[in-house]
Amino acid sequence: MPALPDTELGLTLLAHARRALERHLRLTDDPFVDDERLAQRAATFVTLKLHDELRGCIGSLRPQRALGEDVALNAVAAATRDTRFLPVAADELNAIRIEVSLLSEPQFLEFADEVDLLRQLRPGIDGLILSGSCRSATFLPQVWEQLSEPREFVAALKRKAGLRPDHPIGTLLAATYTVCKWRE
């Protein structure tokens, strides 16, 4: 992942995500842009917003496939498989704004208790993955914009994972990651 957002790469990824949605909705059969950077393995999340409200968000936490393929598949999945929403319709696409997040490799944290974990988090910078008890969930760093207090952030992430907010943190694994993000 680049240390600083690469504007040219960001524009390419946003255009790639939009083209994937257009092709999925059968609005075009134009080919994707050919860019060698899209062949590198990477993990991404694609977030869709309609009138500044979340309309879908799906991604990958680990680099499993080429960057271009990951963005395209996550864009279509955000539009069609985010269970919080109905699939995106063709007549919505022009009003939808796309955000692509390119993730760093997750780093596992060692912590003694919840206070120790909270102390290690960097609000606005770290994405967080919690896993354990056969459940897992993540929040991108962008979620800090809505949940700026670390205790609230972790409690909400536990709920997202299907756990109670007071679930003992010692039974869970935690990992952080950062993102480079681009928005239309």
Image: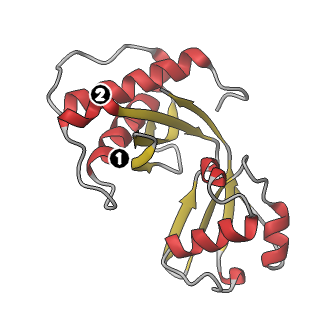
Vertical relation: 39 (above or below) 155: above
Relative to 87, 182 lies left or right: right
Q: Position of residue 77 (x, y in %)?
A: 31, 47
Numbered badge on residue 94: 2
From mark 1 to mark 2, how far is it between C-alphas? 16 Å
Corner quadrant of residue 119 = bottom right
Residue occupying image coordinates x 52% and y 30% = 183
- Location of the N terminus by quadrant is top right
Residue occupying image coordinates x 30% and y 41% = 76
Nearest to the observer: residue 42 or residue 120: 120
* Location of mark 1 (residue): 78
Q: Is residue 161 visible?
A: yes
User: Is disc 1 surrounded by few (<14), some (14 to 19) or many (20+) residues within 10 Å?
Assistant: many
Q: Position of residue 165 (x, y in %)?
A: 61, 81
Residue occupying image coordinates x 65% and y 25% = 5
User: Is disc 2 surrounded by few (<14), some (14 to 19) or many (20+) residues within 10 Å?
Assistant: few
Nearest to the observer: residue 174 or residue 90: 90
Q: Amino acid at mark 2?
A: Asn
Vertical relation: 124 (above or below) 23: below
Numbered badge on residue 120: none
**Mark closer to the chain start, 1 or 2:** 1
Residue occupying image coordinates x 41% and y 28% = 68
Corner quadrant of residue 170 = bottom right
Q: Amino acid at mark 1?
A: Ala
Q: Determine the residue located farthest toward the front in the rendered image.
A: 51
Relative to 80, 61 lies left or right: right
